[in-house]
Amino acid sequence: MLLSPVAFGGFAEMLKRQLDEEITHVRLYYKLVGSLQLKQTPFRGQMTQLVNSLPSLTLKLFALQGLLEGLALGALRYRLAMIENSPSAPVDSRAMQEELAHTRFAFPHFRHLVQCEGAHTWDQFQMVSRLSAQVFEGCFNGRRIADAYQKYFGVNDLDAKIIENSRAMTVSRRLLLRSIQASKSEFLQKYFAAAQASRPVYMC
């Protein structure tokens, strides 16, 4: 995204700041997780492929800041609410505040994006929402969790259906959906307000 001709000035600085903060999150969690880190997950590859396939920076930002950050916020809220005396609680709290800011990082730059790329339609954003939801649902379910425990930790007696129907999954899904919907709605509200106030001139 930083290599795009659209990414200059304050917009590029916004991307760099988010990148730096995400790298910091990785390092903080690595100190906690260490050798138990999952080296490869389907989610990482599928989400990367989806974002790379999107035809504009506007839609890439929506996938990352409007949807993926909402997913992260929901997961962090679940951890803080459900895991007592977690050694990661201070890191979770810091990450949650920074991820919440990330959902709003692009707002001051929407007029810039509209002028450079033109105004996107509601249907385009909904298409990205549907594709992202397919990735989320396909990667975060009882079967995936059971497979991960078997692959990485040698636990073979987990029942995917029991995990899928557990209270933990019910609560986590509720928090995830609530957070994704909130960040998505705020992103789109701000974007369409900026698009209405802007006249694309395609000068970038």
Image: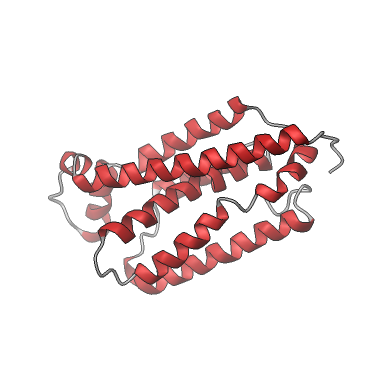
Instruction: Write the residue at 45% across / 43% down.
Output: 180
Residue drawn at the location 29% of the way across and 45% of the way down: 144
Can residue 118 be seen here? The reply is no
Picture coordinates of residue 48, whole percent (x, y) = 53, 46
Instruction: Tell whether 114 sits left or right of 140.
Output: right
Which quadrant holds the C terminus? Answer: top right
- Name the residue at 46% across, 63% down: 95
Q: Nearer the viewer, residue 182 or 32?
A: 182
Q: Between residue 170 and residue 36, name the one nearer to us.
A: 170
Q: Is residue 147 above or below residue 125?
A: below
Is residue 19 something that shows in the picture?
yes
Visual colour scheme: secondary structure
- Left or right, 25 with respect to 138, comes to right
Percent of width and height locating residue 58: 66, 40
Residue lying furthest bottom: 31
Work out which residue is located at the far left of the displayed protein and give it: 157
Q: Residue at x 70, y 50 (%)?
A: 108
Occupied quadrant, residue 52? top right
Task: Locate residue 81, reporting x and y percent.
Answer: 30, 58
